[in-house]
């Protein structure tokens, strides 16, 4: 069964498809260890779980043990913002009972992006403040769940909390422009810099609100004693190297998840079965093409039981 409800706008889906294509063609050889660790973690902690499963954000399923999943669960539901990987699954396992939702799983990202796209602004600072207004308004709204009222024995949520930040940030970056944002940060007027700080604060508040809503939603969709496999990338690291060398000049990191706040929320809904498993997810290594920058994530994987 394919259920198409309220997907993200086409330009966001196109960007997502392009990102996947780049990762598949250019970056896949660099994060083989991440793929191996993800599959290993999934298998280890689901060997004793049966019943029906919800896989949120499977993407192209490179980091999922597909055969194990098909054998382990009696019924599967996939939810993602596009169906590229899911169509491949159905070719590979045509007899497996599978439900599919092509859906903005946050329920509000699509609406937020459309509202921001429709903004009319008189100046750059006016644009920044109006985007912040949209973010603040949605931060105070109650989570609205229009998805089918089904519960599961197991839910897998791989890096979807980080994806919330990525989608929102990439969108306002695309509207304002990375160069313009850097100019404001370093040389903008006082009003522009204040507006940018207001936008960043509202964006962080909104992202955290959506992430907490998703944790609460996953809890509500698990059966009694149900299990959640939650994989997060709280930080993305960026190492700058001296050209044509292995000499590290400096390192930076950007927050994708307010881990302290989330760690305060998780115990309200779940009990940890084991300590988190942590590994490195490498992206393209430093080269002339990417200005000798190496980016990577630190992945944190958890297995949780419903309270």
Image: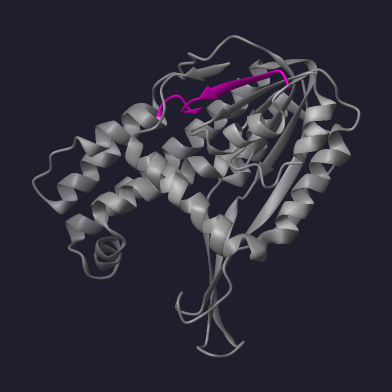
Q: Quadrant of the rendered structure where residue 183 is?
A: bottom left
Residue found at the very far top of the displayed protein: 149
Tell me, what colour scheme is on the image? one colour
Q: Quadrant of the N terminus?
A: top right
Q: Estimate the x, y position of residue 277 in percent, counting from the top left.
A: 79, 49
Q: Estimate the x, y position of residue 221 in percent, counting from the top left.
A: 66, 17
Q: Nearest the camera: 99 or 147?
A: 99
In the picture, measured across the screen, residue 273 lies left or right of residue 280, that is right
Find out whether residue 166 is within the magenta segment: no
Q: Estimate the x, y position of residue 44 in percent, counting from the top left.
A: 88, 40
Residue at point 54%, 22% (across, down): 101
Q: Nearest the camera: 25 or 111?
A: 25
Residue at point 78%, 52% (across, down): 37
In the picture, measured across the screen, residue 286 lies left or right of residue 43, that is left
Residue at point 79%, 36% (across, down): 67
Reply above or below: 74 against 69: above
Residue at point 50%, 80% (across, down): 292
Find out whether residue 97 is within the magenta segment: yes
Tell me, yes or no, if residue 281 can be seen here.
no
Reply above or below: 255 against 74: below
Reply above or below: 111 against 58: above
Range of magenta residues: 96-108
In the picture, measured across the screen, residue 203 lies left or right of residue 188, that is right
Tell me, yes or no, if residue 248 can be seen here.
yes
Residue found at the very far bottom of the displayed protein: 244
Reply above or below: 307 against 260: above
Q: Estimate the x, y position of residue 146 in percent, counting from the top left.
A: 48, 13
Q: Quadrant of the C terminus?
A: top right
């Amino acid at each position: 069964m394919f259920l198409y409800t309220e997907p993200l706008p086409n330009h966001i889906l196109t960007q997502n498809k392009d990102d996947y294509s780049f990762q598949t063609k250019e970056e896949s050889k660099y994060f083989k260890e991440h793929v191996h660790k993800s599959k290993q973690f999934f298998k280890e902690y689901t060997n004793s779980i049966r019943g029906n499963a919800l896989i949120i954000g499977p993407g192209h399923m490179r980091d999922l043990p597909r055969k194990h999943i098909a054998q382990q669960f009696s019924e599967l539901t996939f939810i993602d913002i596009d169906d590229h990987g899911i169509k491949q699954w159905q070719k590979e396992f045509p007899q497996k009972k599978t439900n599919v939702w092509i859906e903005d799983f946050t329920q509000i990202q699509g609406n937020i992006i459309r509202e921001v796209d429709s903004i009319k602004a008189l100046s750059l600072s006016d644009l920044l403040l109006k985007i912040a207004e949209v973010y603040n308004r949605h931060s105070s709204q109650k989570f609205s769940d229009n998805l089918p009222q089904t519960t599961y024995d197991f839910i897998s949520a791989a890096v979807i909390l980080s994806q919330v930040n990525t989608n929102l940030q990439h969108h306002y970056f695309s509207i304002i422009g990375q160069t313009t944002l850097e100019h404001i940060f370093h040389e903008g007027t006082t009003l522009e810099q204040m507006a940018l700080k207001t936008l960043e604060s509202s964006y962080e508040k909104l992202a955290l609100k959506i992430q907490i809503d998703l944790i609460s939603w996953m809890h509500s969709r698990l059966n009694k004693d149900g299990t959640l496999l939650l994989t997060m990338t709280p930080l993305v690291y960026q190492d700058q190297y001296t050209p044509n060398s292995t000499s590290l000049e400096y390192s930076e990191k950007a927050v994708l998840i307010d881990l302290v706040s989330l760690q305060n929320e998780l115990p309200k809904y779940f009990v940890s079965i084991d300590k988190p498993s942590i590994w490195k997810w490498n992206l393209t290594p430093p080269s002339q093409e990417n200005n000798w920058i190496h980016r990577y994530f630190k992945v944190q994987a958890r297995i949780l039981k419903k309270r």
